[in-house]
Image (cartoon, grey):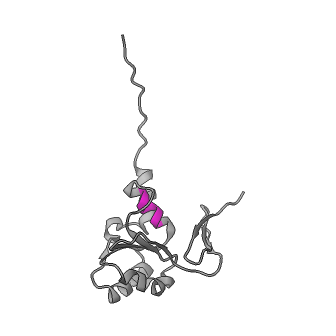
Amino acid sequence: NYFLIGFRNDRSVCELSSPSGFKGCISPKEITTVRNNRDTCLVFEGFWDFLSYLTLQNVKQTNHDAVILNSVANASKATSFIKSHKEIYTYLDNDEGGQRTTRLIKETCPSINDRSAQYAGYKDLNDYLCQKKKATPEVKKKSVGLKR
């Protein structure tokens, strides 16, 4: 059995991913923007990182604007959207591509807040969340009844 999860981009086509590691796109490849008309913009490399952010914040949707690059190769497509914000927070991967993209964004938006240190030692925000969940033992709740 095979299955994929799709995340719609700004061209109304899907970025695809499977638990087995497959990542792809129904062409054309594009960024995904979340527009809430806010002064703050969150920047993510992939949609799993965006969903991990929501999980860590314990919310179903963000109140901020956000852009999911869907590939570091799409960074230039997001520049004008990112630049239109007063506060910018990047949650890019802790690899060469993520760091290079952070530097590229910083060239046009010098006041960005690079959040990758929050998950240093992990590939990305999603990896951090997955490892954190593995390390947190599940606490079984005892049923507490009232005695008469």
Per the rendered image, the range of residues in magenta is: 49-55
8 horizontally vs 137: left or right:
right
x then y, percent, for residue 141: 41, 33
* Residue with the most extreme left position: 111
- The quarter of the displayed image where residue 113 is located: bottom left
1 horizontally vs 66: left or right:
right
Q: Which quadrant is home to the C terminus?
A: top left
Magenta: main secondary structure equals helix
* Residue with the most extreme right position: 1
* Residue with the most extreme top position: 148
Numbered label tally? 0
56 horizontally vs 73: left or right:
left
Is residue 141 placed above or below 76 in the rendered structure?
above
Is residue 48 placed above or below 132 in the rendered structure?
below
Q: Nearer the viewer, residue 60 or 21?
A: 60
The structure residue drawn at horizontal position 43% and vertical position 68%, both measured from the top left corner, is: 124
x then y, percent, for residue 122: 40, 66
The structure residue drawn at horizontal position 65% and vertical position 76%, both measured from the top left corner, is: 26
Q: Is residue 53 magenta?
A: yes
Q: Is residue 127 visible?
A: no
The structure residue drawn at horizontal position 50% and vertical position 65%, both measured from the top left corner, is: 48
The structure residue drawn at horizontal position 55% and vertical position 80%, both measured from the top left corner, is: 30
9 horizontally vs 132: left or right:
right
Q: Is residue 45 magenta?
A: no
Q: Is residue 68 visible?
A: yes
x then y, percent, for residue 36: 41, 69
* Residue with the most extreme bottom position: 107
- The quarter of the displayed image where residue 98 is located: bottom left
Q: Which quadrant is home to the N terminus?
A: bottom right
- The quarter of the displayed image where residue 81 is located: bottom left
